[in-house]
Image: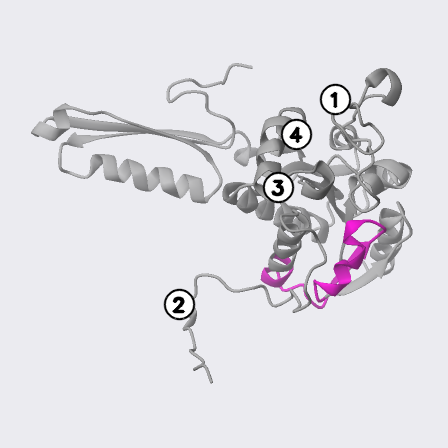
Amino acid sequence: MAEVVEIKQENLVYAKPKLITENVMHYCPGCSHGTVHKLIAEVIEEMGLAEKTVGISPVGCSVFAYNYIDIDWIEAAHGRALAVATAVKRLYPQNMVFTYQGDGDLSAIGTAESIHAAARGENVVAVYINNAIYGMTGGQMAPTTLLGMKTATTPYGRDPRLNGYPYKIAEMMAHLDGATYITRQSVHTAANVRKCKKAIRKAFENSMAGNGFSLVEVVSTCNSGWKLSPVASNQWLAENMLPFYQLGDIKDLTKKEEDKNMKETLIIAGFGGQGVLSMGKILAYSGVMQDYEVTWMPSYGPEMRGGTANVTVILSDKRISSPIAHEFDR
């Protein structure tokens, strides 16, 4: 019998969220759903909302989400998740209410319910999985399918003359007064997983504060529908999905005025051997851990001979095109 080793809390690096059940997930290997489920479970657990959270799951690949996250769930008809969420939140305003919907649900059959929930400013969160295809029903074209993208119903690629254009419902919702936090994230890299979790938490906090509607769109993979391996799917997403569905906060009314457009430029100077470059690295790594955009530009040469040394570090919540430019070229 294997010996059970107790890990002290201060030595614990990672543990499976307590709200994730022992059930084996039915999702295809490499699917983004499992990662997003884990993030939601972690956020609920960290916020202490396990007993106050209600998830609404409609028809789609995530229809069995109640098997994997141990909270209260309600099954909704296809496209009607936000209508159900509206009722639950109005009846139980003290509860955390969120929907978990795919692009075929939120932005196709459920477009009307989605738009009007955002327009009314319902205090709920919609977690929106955008993989540009109908994954559960066989890989048909979705409203989010890219131009030229091949699916079961567009075998020669999506043609705008026949199939119309893909649309971005996040940008559409951002124009509505009732929507206060609209963001688009992904989980195809470790760094993006961290940013996505941060966005989900912000959306949940926004809802519990009664500030209005929040949407967290997650640009995701569907390696089965795309006919690609999990690794190739992540690469295809980065090369094809992200140029069209650009990541970042689209609308954020939760920020305080002093928090907007944060940008700090630091120049650290001294002599070689005093730890100048190391200090710059520590600052840069700290910025990365806080999900800021970072540049680190050290000087090389004289410091190795005891001369002067300097390093420039920039931390910003917006893209930095070079270590010295204030705005990136569009």
State the residue lying farthest toward the left: 305
| Residue designated by label 2 | 10
Q: Which residue is mark 4?
A: 241
Evaluate whether residue 95 shows in this view: no
Name the residue type under label 2. Glu
Q: CA distance from mark 2 to mark 1?
A: 51 Å
Mark toward the viewer: 1 or 4: 1
Q: Is residue 139 above or below residue 243?
A: below
Residue identifier under label 3 = 229
Question: Residue type at mark 4?
Answer: Met
Q: CA distance from mark 1 to mark 4?
A: 12 Å
Secondary structure at numbered mark 2: helix
> From which residue to which does the magenta span run?
43-70
Rendered image quadrant of residue 166: top right
Of marks 3 and 1, which one's residue comes earlier in the chain?
Answer: 1
The three-letter code of the residue at mark 3 reads Ser
Q: Residues within 10 Å of mark 3 (few under 14, many from 20)?
A: some
> Mark 2 and mark 3: span between their CA atoms?
38 Å
